[in-house]
Amino acid sequence: MLVVTSEGQLRRWREHFDETFRPSVLSSSGAPQDTSPPLRPLDINDEPPTCDEVVRAVMALQIIKAPGVDLITAEMFKADLATTVDTLTPLIDKI
């Protein structure tokens, strides 16, 4: 069936997305029943980074790149790694 009106097209797009992103099955009472899998908790480490992780992150920065809005380049971070880690680690902990 060809839909030629704007209202008909919008209605058909809505039907399409409802069918695609909201799959449901009718229960015995006729009410829609959600068939999506149950949500499971994600195993995400929310601990502050360790000094070793900060060192690895700084060392992974690419050199000879334009600085950000703070005008700090990767070379500046890498020039004195100990001071960088001692400064950044507590700062990151506060965030």
Image (tube, helix red, strand yellow):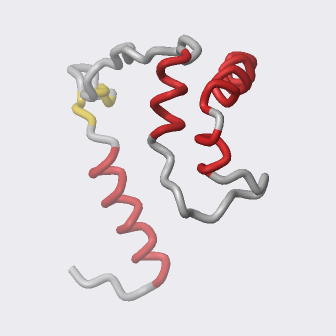
Is residue 84 rendered to the left or right of residue 55?
Answer: right
Q: Residue at x 54, y 26 (%)?
A: 54
Q: Which of 94 and 82 is in front in this view?
A: 82
Figure quadrant of the C terminus: top right
Is residue 15 rendered to the left or right of residue 46?
Answer: left
Is residue 83 rendered to the left or right of residue 16?
Answer: right
Figure quadrant of the N terminus: bottom left
Q: Residue at x 27, y 28 (%)?
A: 36
Quarter location, residue 13:
bottom left
Q: Which of 81 and 41 is in front in this view?
A: 81
Q: In this view, does 79 lie above or below 88?
A: below
Which residue sits furthest front?
A: 79
Horizontal and vertical percent position of residue 17: 35, 56
Horizontal and vertical percent position of residue 70: 78, 52
Q: Which of 34 and 83 is in front in this view?
A: 83
Horizontal and vertical percent position of residue 11: 42, 67
Which residue sits furthest bottom?
A: 4
Q: Which residue is drawn at 53% across and 37% down?
A: 58
Q: Is residue 6 above or below residue 47?
A: below
- Total label count? 0
Q: In this view, does 73 lie above or below 59?
A: below
Horizontal and vertical percent position of residue 35: 25, 28
Quarter location, residue 81:
top right
Q: Which residue is drawn at 38% across and 17% down?
A: 42
Q: In this view, does 67 lie above or below 42?
A: below
